Image (cartoon, rainbow, N blue to C red):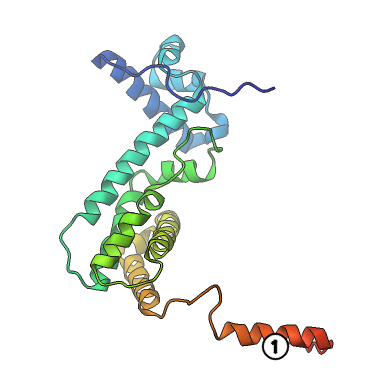
């Protein structure tokens, strides 16, 4: 039976000197992750880059996985703080202002070390004990309250909040990496606000299928039973 590798820090720094060592280790790990990727990250390379003895590194971290988990935790805290600060800014209570505040909050969060964010999302394997939820997932309920306070009505507001958070997180994440000019200029925010406002103003689905979809599925089923399939032009 395989032994699970420990991925939490051995101990937390107490003195300023110890904190400086841990900071150097984390900064070195971030540098190597962004430049060379997770596969080429090793504790020896981290210690060399940080300018610390390998024994000093092992006083605080048992392996590279524990370093990455701690680095991601701290990165997540910084992005969470940026998002919460953006959501706390004064705003009008209309739908567009609410959505703009939400999207701008995601932009603020995702623009903190975007290269490191990409590594966490695309290269780092899933590790036991890693943060299992991003800021958007954890605050889906808060987003729902945020929408309700601005007059958004839905029979499934918590689900609406989760969907909104998920869409924002995904689009902004890729926008920061793939369309940085549009993200910086505000064009991406404008497009997102328009798209989301149109969605939220529409009639919510009543049940698992929209009524207009049911007749189409019924006709397909009947045609299949009769063997009357036709080519779709």
Q: Quadrant of the C terminus?
A: bottom right
Residues packed near mark 1 inside 10 Å, few (<14), some (14 to 19) or many (20 plus)? few
Classify 39 as above or below 179.
above
Residue name at image x 45 percent, y 9 percent: 55
Q: Is residue 211 left or right of residue 28?
A: right
On screen, residue 69 above or below 160: above
Horizontal relation, residue 118 to residue 27: left or right: right
Quarter residue 215 falls in: bottom right
Image location (x, y in percent) of residue 95: 26, 72
The total number of labels drawn is: 1
Q: Residue at x 29, y 19 (%)?
A: 19
Residue 101 visible? The answer is yes
Say if residue 102 shows up in the picture. Answer: no
Judging by the rendered image, the residue that carries numbered circle 1 is 219
- The vertical placement of 62 against 108, above or below, is above
- At horizontal 32% and vertical 70% (from top left) the residue drawn is 190
Q: Quadrant of residue 106?
A: bottom left
**As rendered, which of 226 and 10 lies closer to the eye?**
226
């Amino acid at each position: 039976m395989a032994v699970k590798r420990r991925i939490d820090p051995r101990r937390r720094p107490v003195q300023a000197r110890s904190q400086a060592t841990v900071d150097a280790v984390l900064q070195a790990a971030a540098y190597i992750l962004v430049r060379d990727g997770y596969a080429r990250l090793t504790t020896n390379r981290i210690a060399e880059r940080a300018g610390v003895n390998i024994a000093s590194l092992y006083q605080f971290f048992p392996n590279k996985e524990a370093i990455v988990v701690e680095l991601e935790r701290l990165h997540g805290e910084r992005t969470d703080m940026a998002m919460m600060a953006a959501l706390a800014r004064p705003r009008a209570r209309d739908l567009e202002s609410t959505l703009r505040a939400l999207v701008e909050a995601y932009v603020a969060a995702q623009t903190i070390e975007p290269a490191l964010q990409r590594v966490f999302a695309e290269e780092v394997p899933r590790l036991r004990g890693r943060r299992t939820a991003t800021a958007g997932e954890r605050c889906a309920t808060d987003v729902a309250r945020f929408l309700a306070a601005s007059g958004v009505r839905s029979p499934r507001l918590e689900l609406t909040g989760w969907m909104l958070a998920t869409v924002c997180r995904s689009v902004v994440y890729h926008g920061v990496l793939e369309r940085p000019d549009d993200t910086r200029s505000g064009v991406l925010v404008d497009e997102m606000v328009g798209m989301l406002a149109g969605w939220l103003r529409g009639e919510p689905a009543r049940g698992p299928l929209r009524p207009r979809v049911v007749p189409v599925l019924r006709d397909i089923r009947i045609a299949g039973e009769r063997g009357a399939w036709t080519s779709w032009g």
